[in-house]
Structure formats: structure tokens, C-alpha cells
Amino acid sequence: MVPIATPLRPDLRPGPMLSIVIPFYDEVEVLPECLARLGTVLCGLDLQTEIVFVDDGSTDGSADRILSAPRRSFDVRLLRLSRNFGKEAAMSAGLAHARGDAIIVLDADLQDPPELIPEMIELWRAGADVVQMQRRSRNGESAFKRASAHLFYRILQRLSPAPIPVDTGDFRLMSRRAVDALLRLPERNRYMKGLYAWIGMPTAVVQYDRAPRHGGRSKWDYAHLIGLALEGITSFSVAPLRLATVAGAFTATAGALFCLWIVVKALLLGNPVPGYPSLVALIAFLGGMQLLGIGIVGEYVGKTYLETKQRPLYVLRDDLLLQGLPARASMEAVQRQHA
Ligand code: UDP
Ligand code: MG
């Protein structure tokens, strides 16, 4: 744990601290703008702040942009993972290292506008442990992506043990106790939407318009998103297993009724041995049902196998602290950079 430095904003009474956690992977195009916009917002807050950047194995020199940015009146922590572990793991690393009393998770690509931070803090101060940011619109995303996201969120909502408001992602504020609760969940499989819902806590919801990416491109293709959707459903719901049971019971009943019908028909009308096509159709159908059932069971067996290995979620390569400068010196540093 890095010791807390002397206050960078002596104008503020020592009080609660805000951490901003930003996982990023190859975001060299957007990071300077992200830092600039965040800097403006954070310097206007009446809170001690830190930014925790998590470099999820970037290979495009993104981390250098952070190291070379002018110092501001808040600490910047740079955690570098040993390779690309995925956003979920990167976020977990950030949350585990954030020191704040309130913690906000933000995407580096500026799709989550940092200008909403003051509003989130207000709601936190009013007593919310979690401030969820709900997308009113998604600009710059294809109609298909929007439609599939819409459908997925609705399915998820039906299966979730606790209500998940639709169209909310990782952009959110969490209080210290909410983050501690999240960090206590030991599973390797970090399906965050499921975990957020599980911890509960008094929650406020803010609607916002999701901006298009500031630059660069999304790391998610459809194969990835479909994988994530399956992952999501199987990681916090056993509904598919239940579905397999119900489907099995249903087909078995239908099969028994069909047998009965054949016997009765043979008794009443004799047996001219028809029915080769129906036999093949039945075998194919039942074979398919069985494979589907085995596949569903396999998904859960696989999950159990991965969990039993108890591997850490990520491996840290570096943990750098760029200590902030007192407010006045930081202003001068920024002005020098822009001069
Ligand atoms: N990201 C990450 N690791 C990854 C993929 C993405 O840390 O393996 C970060 C990415 O840099 C961005 C955030 O996660 O800050 C959201 O990713 P992206 O914009 O690609 O996803 P989308 O907004 O399209 O869902
Ligand atoms: Mg994005």
C-alpha cells in the first residue's frame, strides 16, 4: 500500500477521497484527451482525488502518454498488468488498488463523459452507495449492436437474482463498502454485471447519453460479444440447466405419448410398418436434445474446473505512483505544456 501523500489541495479540509479507475488497452489515441478532460473536471472538485490507470497489456505506448502528461493536483497511479487479461481483470486490479472512499470506473475512450462525475458525487454524498449510469442513447454504435445489446440486457434482467437496470455498463460510482463487498467475492470469473447486482446496496440511477468513441476502435467484435453474453448468463444463473431439465421432461412426456399412440394404433388398425421418416426425425431430434443438454452441463463443469484452479485474476508488472503537485504548481505545469 502506498502511503497517502501530504494533501495536494491544501485549500481542502482533509476529508474523503475520490478514486477514478480507468482500465485501458491500446488507447494511445484517446488517452491525452482523456487525461485533459478528466484533469479539468477533477481540479474543479472539492475532494482529494487520484486516478488509477490500469494498463491491460497495451503494446502501442499508451502508458508513456500517461507518464509524460503534465502533473496535476491529484495523484496518478499506473498499474501495468503483465499481459492483456481483459477489461474485467483490469478493473478488478484497479478497484483492489484504489484508496478512495468513493470509486468511479470509467472507460478510457471517453464514451463515459467525465463531466458527469460531479453529479455522481452529489448522489453519493446524498447517501447512495452505488450510482449506476444508465445509457439513454448509444451514439456511434450500429443498429445491430444496439438491438442485440437491447435483447441481451432484457434476457439478463429476467435471469438475474437481483434487479439489473437495463443498459448499464461498468461506468458507475461505488462507495468504499460497495467496493470492499465486490472485492470479497472470490470467483475467478468476473462477470461484473452479475457481481454488481449481487452485492446490492442503496443505488441511484442517472441517465446519460453515451458518446461515440473519441478515437481508436472498440476491442469487441461480435464473436467476443456473443461469448461474453453466454459467459454472462452461465456465470450467475443456472437457468440453462433448469431449462435442459424442463426440455428433457417435456420431450420424454411427448415421447411416451407418442409410444402410446403407436401401440393403440397398432392394436386398432394392425401394423403395416410405416414410419421410417418419423423414426429418423425422432432420432435426430432426440440426439440433438441430448447433445444440447450435455453442452449446457459442460459449460458449468468447465466453469467449476476453472474456478478450482484458484489462479490470481491478473499479474502485476509495475505499480507506479506519479505523485501530484500542489494545485498552483500543477496549473503552471499544464500551462507550460500548452504554451
Ligand atoms: N479494455 C481493456 N482491456 C481489454 C479490452 C478493453 O482494458 O482487453 C478497455 C478499453 O481500453 C476501454 C474499455 O475497456 O477503456 C472499454 O473498451 P471498448 O471501448 O473497446 O468497449 P466498448 O465501449 O466498445 O464496449
Ligand atoms: Mg468504448
Image: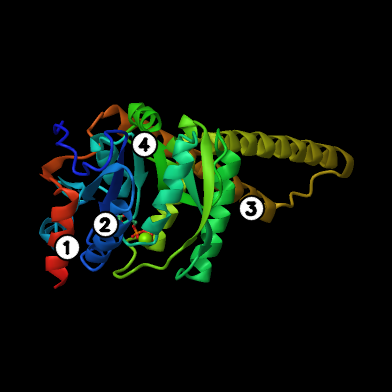
Q: Is mark 4 within 8 Å of ligand 1?
A: no
Q: Which is more N-terminal, label 2 or label 1?
A: 2
**In the displayed image of the protein, which residue is found farthest to the bottom?**
339
* Residue in the picture at 45% in, 34% down: 129
Q: CA distance from mark 3 to mark 4?
A: 31 Å
**Mark 4 belongs to which amino acid?**
Gly
Query: Can the viewer see residue 297 in this picture?
Result: no
Q: Which is more N-terminal, label 1 or label 4?
A: 4
Q: Quadrant of residue 113?
A: bottom left
State whether residue 238 is above or below residue 75. Answer: above
State whether residue 174 is above or below residue 166. Answer: above
> Which residue bears the numbered disc 4?
302
Which of the two residues, 325 or 88, is positioned nearer the viewer here? Answer: 325
Q: Secondary structure at mark 2?
A: helix
Q: Pointer 1 and pointer 2: residues touching (CB < 8 Å)?
A: yes
> Which residue bears the numbered disc 3?
281
Q: Secondary structure at mark 4?
A: helix
Give the percent coordinates (x, y) of residue 327.
19, 51
Q: Secondary structure at mark 3?
A: helix
Classify 10 Å Cα crowding around label 1: few (below 14), some (14-19), many (20 and above): some
Give the percent coordinates (x, y) of residue 165.
56, 45
> Which residue bears the numbered disc 2?
39
Q: CA distance from mark 2 to mark 3?
A: 65 Å
Q: Pointer 3 and pointer 1: residues touching (CB < 8 Å)?
A: no
> Which residue bears the numbered disc 1?
334
Q: Quadrant of residue 268?
A: top right
Q: Pointer 3 and pointer 4: residues touching (CB < 8 Å)?
A: no
Q: Is mark 2 within 8 Å of ligand 1?
A: no
Eye-nearest disc, 1 or 2 = 1
Eye-nearest disc, 4 or 1 = 1
Classify 10 Å Cα crowding around label 2: few (below 14), some (14-19), many (20 and above): some
